[in-house]
Image: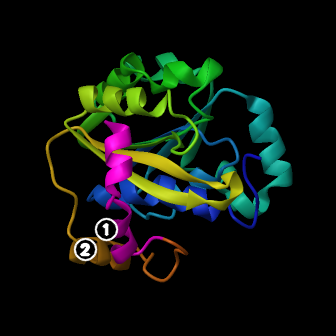
């Protein structure tokens, strides 16, 4: 199972909005993967967004999602702000120096052919493509299942980005607690709850989201010690 209409928000909201809300004024956003359009739908809900590039490997995912998953993408796949690039993302960021304010990695699990997307060289290319205040959000897999993959992925993020803030969210579609990481290019603390509340209000999202509020934004970064030890 990759996604369901009923529960897709339990993945897409925590995958997208913490990063978007952390940035004070996101204009240029990149999504790697995300062929169902759910992440793009969440991104363009922020009115400051002028460009949202989706780098998707499989064009058939886009074609099928346009037809079969309108409840998830809500027309985002045909929004004028969303630019779809059908290509391998490994080399996409190499010539995009300091361009993107936010990058969202909406990937398959960190196994097999996707492993390269969870390693330091790819993260470094993304970091170079991010603006000074750039923010990255990525999942690093089901924290109760990928014991061999998650700690190295988290370490790679720590090696590349100045700030690496892990967070957790339950995803019913996957029957697990998913591990996510929010990374900042420069050293900075996460915004205060009052500032997140203000940004939600200014962006017209305060009563629109199902899971992310100023309070839940703060709460998801509070990791139990057992998970902190596991990541290290």
Q: Quadrant of the C terminus?
A: top left
The residue wearing badge 1 is 218
Picture coordinates of residue 174, whole percent (x, y): 67, 51
Query: So how many labels did they put on this image?
Result: 2
What residue is at 26 percent from the left and 27 percent from the top?
Answer: 160
Q: Is residue 157 magenta?
A: no
Q: Give residue 101's mark.
A: none
- In terms of depth relative to the viewer, which is nearer, 14 or 152? 152
Note whether residue 217 is visible: yes
Q: Is residue 228 magenta?
A: yes
188 relative position to 37: left or right? left
Picture coordinates of residue 69, whole percent (x, y): 79, 55
Picture coordinates of residue 29, whole percent (x, y): 43, 44
- In terms of depth relative to the viewer, which is nearer, 29 or 171? 171
What residue is at 29 percent from the left and 25 percent from the top?
Answer: 128
The residue wearing badge 2 is 193
What residue is at 20 percent from the left and 69 percent from the top?
Answer: 192
Q: Where is 32 relative to 114, above or below? A: below
């Amino acid at each position: 199972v990759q996604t369901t209409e009923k529960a897709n928000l339990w993945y897409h909201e925590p995958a997208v909005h913490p990063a978007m809300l952390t940035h004070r004024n996101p204009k240029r956003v990149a999504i790697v993967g995300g062929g169902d359009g759910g992440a793009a739908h969440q991104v363009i809900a922020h009115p400051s967004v002028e460009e949202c590039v989706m780098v998707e490997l499989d064009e058939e995912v886009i074609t099928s999602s346009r037809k079969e998953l309108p409840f998830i993408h809500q027309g985002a796949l045909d929004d004028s702000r969303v630019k779809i690039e059908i290509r391998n993302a490994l080399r996409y960021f190499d010539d995009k120096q300091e361009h993107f304010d936010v990058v969202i990695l909406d990937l398959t699990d960190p196994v097999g052919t996707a492993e390269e997307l969870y390693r330091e060289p790819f993260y470094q290319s993304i970091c170079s493509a991010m603006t000074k205040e750039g923010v990255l959000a990525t999942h690093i897999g089901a924290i109760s299942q990928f014991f061999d993959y998650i700690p190295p992925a988290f370490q790679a993020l720590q090696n590349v980005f100045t700030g690496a803030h892990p967070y957790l969210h339950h995803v019913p579609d996957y029957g697990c607690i998913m591990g996510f990481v929010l990374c900042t290019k420069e050293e900075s603390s996460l915004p205060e709850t009052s500032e997140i509340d203000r940004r939600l209000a200014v962006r017209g999202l305060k009563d629109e989201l199902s899971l992310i509020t100023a309070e839940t934004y703060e709460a998801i970064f509070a990791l139990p010690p057992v998970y902190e030890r596991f990541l290290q």
